[in-house]
Image (cartoon, rainbow, N blue to C red):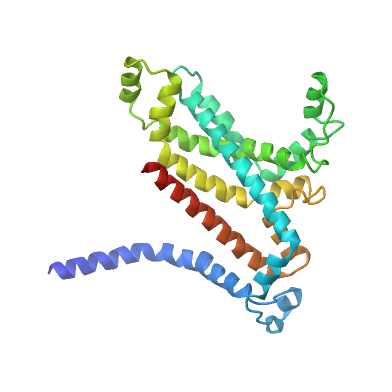
Amino acid sequence: MRADWRGAQARAGWAFLAPALILIGAFFVLPVAAGLGLSFTDFDIYAIGDPGVARFTGAGNYAQVLREPEFWNALRNTLYFVAVGGPLTILASLAAALLVNDRRARWKGLFRVVFFTPVVTTLVAVSIVWRYLYHPHYGLIDEALGLLGIHPIDWLGDPHWAMPAIMVLAVWKNFGYTMLILIAALQNVPEELYEAAALDGAGGWARLVYITLPALRPTLLFVGIITVIGQFQVFAEPYVMTQGGPLRSTATVVLYMYEQGFRWWHLGLATAIAFILFAIMLAATLVQMRLQRGAER
């Protein structure tokens, strides 16, 4: 009798899971499997009309990508974007969360909306607006710098400044989402810990270092992982603002993949780039998790 009841429970559970599993299989597993198979062929614009002309190349696409100097330049730009933009995004979101969550702060709801608004705005539209803000002759940023006596900077035309300019946009655009996650985590920190620390004479910095940050460690790991994954996939900002220039200083891996797939129609090669990027993101995630475990010991 108990076995029949457990069997009925299992069948009911699978029945509830079936719609979600079917959707995941149809729109995630099958496309990923098809893409993996595509990465081992020379699928191009001609194969779109007649898939039979596509030839199996084995690991040839992967070897070709790893031989391309353009790929390594794009990877170097992407790693620079992740290594600098990722921590800046987390620091900005943590600072905003601490300020908004402070007991002395007023109009908390208003500031949450203000900080989160860039997240829900259209990225392409925002990139166009920021491109005009960075204009060397008519942009508001250089106008403000001119009032301070600083010579105007060609933000998007100088190879040394183009990527930092895009990073500032990306940080402004994305920090509001992680800010809300950190605010939710901050509200779960027991208030008694802060009261006890204050009675012991601990200042604000000591409470932050010894209470707040340790309590936020699992959340910071999650925020770090999703931020790094998002930074590795940066595409719209350099595509709209610089087209990968100047001198390919803002070309990223996803932009390079887009150019191979939809400008030159080397779809097999572009798919191989996508899986190489997936492997890099997986490795970065595993490194973050390993560092987190090491810090907890």
In the visual, does 215 lie left or right of 173? left
Percent across and percent down for residue 203 are 42, 17
Residue ID at (75%, 59%): 70
> Farthest residue in the bottom direction?
52
For residue 264, side relative to residue 2 (left or right) = right
Q: Residue at x 70, y 58 (%)?
A: 72
* Residue 26 is at least partly visible in this image: yes
Q: Nearer the viewer, residue 263 or 195?
A: 195
Q: How many marks?
A: 0
Which residue is outermost to the right? Answer: 137
Residue 235 at least partly seen = no
Residue at the spot x=49%, y=19% of the render?
A: 105
Closer to the camera, 245 or 2? Answer: 245
- Where residue 214 sits, quadrant-wise, is top left
Residue 114 in the image: above or below residue 84: above
Q: Is residue 52 left or right of residue 148?
A: left
Residue 182: % across, % down? 46, 35
- Quarter of the image with the N terminus in it: bottom left
| Nearest to the observer: residue 130 or residue 256 | 256
Q: Is residue 11 above or below residue 120?
A: below
- Residue 220: x, y in percent? 46, 40
Q: Where is residue 91? Give x, y as percent.
A: 55, 33
Identify the image quadrant of the C terminus: top left
Residue in view at x 34 percent, y 66 percent: 15
248 left or right of 10? right
Displayed quadrant of residue 129: top right
204 vs 70: above or below: above
